[in-house]
Amino acid sequence: MPKENLLGPIGQGVEMSPQTMIYEMNACGACALGLMEEAMDMTMAYVGSRMHKDGMPFPMRYDVMRVRLMENVADINFVRGATYAAALAYDAGQPNIVDSLLFKASCFKLAERVTSTCIDLEGGVGLSKSVGLERLYRDAKVGLIGGGQYDFIMSNTGAMRFMGIA
């Protein structure tokens, strides 16, 4: 293999592995944020265009719709802030493997909730393949499994914290 294609010094792969994992987990959080924002944009456009028979948009007519929409906004804002914080820690040379794993798992857990709520708000149409929300929901579910399943991450990071490793 040409030297310019090496990722690091030969024989140092094990030492580089945690840094690679931290980078991947942080990137996963950013992916979760993107799919949450896309789902919310699609849902806001749809529910804002739906009119009640009295002429009011659905979200202005039904309190619970506004509550669910704002819960989604709060979740998205939280993930956005956490994404910036994770990137800043990484760039400052202060990455933490446990925090990165928890970040990835939590972001996709919230992405699952946001996309599910968006489907609920759109009703039956939200499950239609032509809308695209069902794909975003599947992506959020896959994010909970790929790169470390949610319960596995939570269990192992909990063990690491209780043993004083991280």
Image: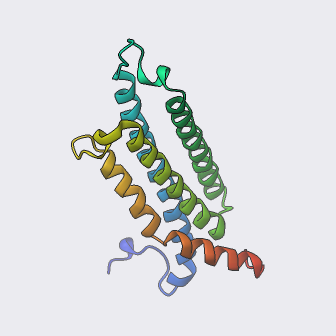
Residue extending farthest to the front is: 53
- State the quadrant of the C terminus: bottom right
Give the residue drawn at x 48%, y 21%. Answer: 61
Measured as percent of width and height from the top left, residue 132 is found at 28, 44
| Quadrant hosting residue 151 | bottom right
Is 86 or 72 nearer to us in this picture? 72
- Between 87 and 39, the residue placed more toward the observer is 39
Across and down, in percent, residue 84 comes to 60, 47
Outermost top residue: 55
Residue at coordinates 45% horizontally, 70% vertically from top-left?
147
Towards the viewer: 12 or 153:
153
Residue at coordinates 39% horizontally, 34% vertically from top-left? 43
Res 96 quadrant in image: bottom right
Q: Is residue 49 above or below residue 54?
A: below
> What residue is drawn where x is 65% and y is 69%?
98
Q: Quadrant of residue 126?
A: top left
Residue 122: where, in percent of width, then height? 36, 37
Q: How is the image coloured?
A: rainbow
- Number of numbered callouts drawn: 0
Q: Residue furthest bottom?
A: 11
Q: Quadrant of the N terminus?
A: bottom left
Vertical position of residue 13 compared to residue 55: above or below: below
Query: Left or right: 53 with respect to 111?
Result: left
- Percent x, y for residue 137? 38, 52
